[in-house]
């Protein structure tokens, strides 16, 4: 091939510099230039080709797939997906992963599958999904550290990585499973519609990479999106759009069958159990329950007994409460920034829960200390100059109880705010409240029986029977409510609650069995036996003490298993997935 022929085909050869080249007389000009070209780095080659406009004009492939102007007031950007053009090639997934520099196990955009129809006329539809940049993003309102912001011009919901503490609450709040936790970095990350590229009139990675132009960025009228969210179905199997008002629109000219469902609709698998949250929730409710039950017994016990018994029970409950707050830090990806968790008090129930239990811990510490400070000889002169301790203990005890109840209420709302059926407010409130009652009662019984014989006798004669009966009734009621979950197995509709029941009787049947065994033995059998064994049956106090300790440990184990199932047997809502 001659040099002239190369010129005719528009083959461009980069030139390293403008100085004249000295080449071997035995080599042709073309051979010399090719040798020089091989000395260039990949960056130098690309830069030279860019300067000479030798690269394909990529904008012609995607310029029509992004808006030509910025959103006006009342508008924002949104994804539009042409279902007829999507072939599930996953080029968008690859481009998103590569261009955003995601880790190996990170995925911000995924491709799912819908199928339905009849055996004679089956239907199948692939669906590409990512963050929907909702009008009312639940991730942003739920975040306790304000690590999300919605751009006031474009409407893009961005995640602020530097602000995130890795609490993962936004994952529970989002009904479309858009935020993803990166364990290595200790933070959550998500799609930001490649906002930097859009700002420079470049298309997002998914838009530019799709060979069929199935994804585009459109201008969304916010008021119209609100109206459509109240009257339309988003996608089969996905959460209702009125929760967060997603702005992604899916278009098709085909008439899809009404029975279209995600390919993974009938697949159920255990969810993340969040062990630190399991421990935190159970122990905070134990602590609050013990304080409240102890306060209720103050009238049954005399003043001196209240002072001795109350001091021990308050100290025991305080230790568990502080342990719970420390356990919660293990759930954070970046616990060193936990102090930021109060920033979201205006919108986040998680921030309010943290505040409630912080107040509870402070009041409980003062209340427990009020029993022991007078006994310290070095503080005797100071204590004698202060009002009687009993006068301070009464308001402190109510402050502890009220702040503890406030904390438990916020715990309930943390999960009720997700609007998931299995975490609805009434059911979650019942579970958390009965946990506090069961563990509080068993704790007070154990502490009372482990005290000296004199005070144990007071508890036995004046409060033991009532407290044991209360423990039996509350435990039986809670176990019956939990057993009622299995009635959903007989229903034909594959609801969220049915999926939970399938998990509890299948993959999680071991934890389910232990939960009911420990709960029944510790909360019903042993308290019932002790009722018939006291106080005048001749049973030794040592036997009653042993029964009380075992009952407490079994109740604690049962509630830990119940809270484990609360997370692990609660299928998360998400966008349609594929076959696996």
Image (cartoon, rainbow, N blue to C red):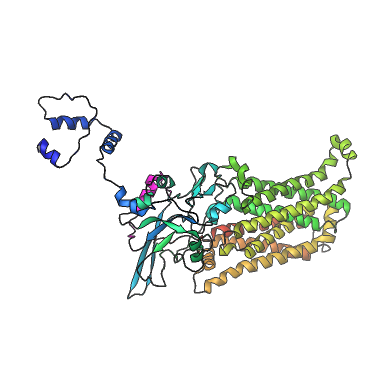
In the image, 342: left or right of 51?
A: right
Across and down, in percent, residue 511 comes to: 56, 59
Which quadrant of the view contains residue 521? Answer: bottom right
Across and down, in percent, residue 338 comes to: 61, 43
Count of all numbered marks drawn on residues in the image = 0
Residue 160 vs 443, above or below: the answer is above
Quadrant (top left, top right, bottom left, bottom right) of the N terminus = top left
- Residue name at image x 18 percent, y 33 percent: 34
Across and down, in percent, residue 536 comes to: 84, 63
Quadrant (top left, top right, bottom left, bottom right) of the C terminus = bottom left
Q: Is residue 571 visible?
A: yes
In the image, 2: left or right of 166?
A: left
Q: Is residue 556 visible?
A: no
- Residue name at image x 24 percent, y 27 percent: 17
Residue 377 vs 400, above or below: the answer is above
- Residue name at image x 68 percent, y 56 percent: 408
Residue 120 vs 112, above or below: the answer is below
Across and down, in percent, residue 357 comes to: 69, 50
Q: Residue 94: within the magenta?
A: yes
In the image, 402: left or right of 513?
A: right
- Of 109 and 283, which appears nearest the observer? 109
- What range is drawn magenta here? 84-106
- Residue name at image x 66 percent, y 55 percent: 410
Q: Residue 571: within the magenta?
A: no
- Of 537 and 576, which appears nearest the observer? 576
Residue 538 vs 13, above or below: the answer is below
């Amino acid at each position: 091939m001659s040099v002239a022929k190369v010129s005719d085909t528009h083959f461009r050869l980069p030139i390293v510099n403008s100085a004249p080249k000295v080449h071997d007389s035995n080599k042709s000009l073309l051979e010399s230039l090719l040798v020089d070209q091989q000395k260039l780095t990949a960056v130098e080659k690309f830069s030279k080709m860019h300067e000479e406009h030798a690269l394909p004009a990529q904008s012609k492939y995607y310029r029509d797939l992004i808006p030509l102007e910025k959103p006006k007031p009342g508008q924002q950007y949104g994804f539009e997906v042409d279902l007829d053009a999507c072939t599930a090639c996953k080029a968008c997934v690859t481009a998103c992963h590569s261009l955003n520099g995601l880790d190996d196990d990170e995925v911000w955009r995924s491709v799912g599958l819908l199928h339905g129809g009849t055996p004679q006329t089956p239907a199948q539809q692939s669906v590409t999904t990512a963050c929907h940049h909702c009008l009312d993003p639940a991730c942003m309102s739920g975040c306790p550290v304000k690590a999300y912001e919605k751009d006031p011009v474009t409407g893009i919901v961005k995640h602020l990585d530097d602000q995130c503490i890795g609490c993962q609450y936004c994952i529970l709040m989002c009904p479309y499973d858009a935020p993803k936790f990166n364990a290595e970095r200790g933070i959550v990350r998500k799609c930001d519609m490649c906002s930097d590229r859009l700002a420079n009139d470049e298309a997002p990675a998914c838009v530019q990479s799709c060979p069929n132009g199935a994804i585009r960025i459109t201008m969304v009228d916010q008021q119209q999106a609100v109206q459509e969210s109240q009257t339309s179905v988003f996608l089969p199997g996905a959460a209702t759009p009125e929760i967060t008002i997603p702005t992604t629109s899916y278009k098709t000219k085909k008439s899809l069958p009404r029975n279209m469902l995600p390919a993974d609709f009938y697949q159920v698998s255990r969810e993340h159990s969040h062990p630190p949250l399991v421990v935190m929730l159970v122990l905070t409710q134990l602590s609050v329950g013990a304080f409240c039950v102890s306060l209720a017994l103050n009238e049954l016990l005399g003043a001196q007994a209240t002072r001795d018994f109350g001091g021990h029970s308050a100290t025991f409950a305080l230790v568990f409460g502080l342990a719970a707050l420390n356990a919660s830090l293990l759930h954070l990806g970046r616990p060193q920034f936990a102090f930021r968790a109060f920033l979201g008090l205006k919108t986040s129930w998680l921030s309010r829960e943290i505040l409630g239990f912080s107040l509870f811990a402070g009041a409980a510490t003062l209340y427990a200390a009020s029993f022991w400070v007078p006994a310290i000889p070095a503080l005797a002169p100071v204590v004698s100059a202060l009002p009687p301790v009993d006068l301070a203990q009464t308001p402190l005890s109510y402050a502890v109880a009220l702040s503890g109840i406030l904390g438990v209420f916020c715990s309930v709302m943390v999960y009720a705010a997700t609007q998931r059926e299995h975490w609805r407010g009434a059911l979650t409130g019942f579970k958390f409240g009965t946990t506090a009652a069961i563990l509080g009662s068993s704790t007070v019984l154990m502490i009372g029986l482990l005290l000296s014989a004199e005070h144990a006798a007071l508890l036995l004669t004046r409060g033991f029977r009532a407290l044991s009966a209360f423990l039996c009734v509350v435990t039986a009621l809670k176990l019956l409510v939990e057993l009622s979950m299995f009635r959903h197995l007989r229903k034909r509709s594959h609801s969220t609650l049915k999926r939970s029941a399938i998990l509890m009787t299948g993959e999680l049947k071991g934890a389910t069995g232990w939960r009911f065994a420990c709960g029944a033995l510790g909360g019903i059998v042993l308290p019932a036996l002790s009722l018939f064994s006291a106080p005048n049956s001749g049973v030794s106090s040592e036997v009653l003490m042993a029964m009380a300790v075992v009952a407490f440990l079994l109740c604690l184990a049962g509630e830990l298993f119940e809270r484990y199932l609360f997370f692990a047997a609660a299928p998360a809502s998400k966008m349609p997935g594929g076959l696996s």
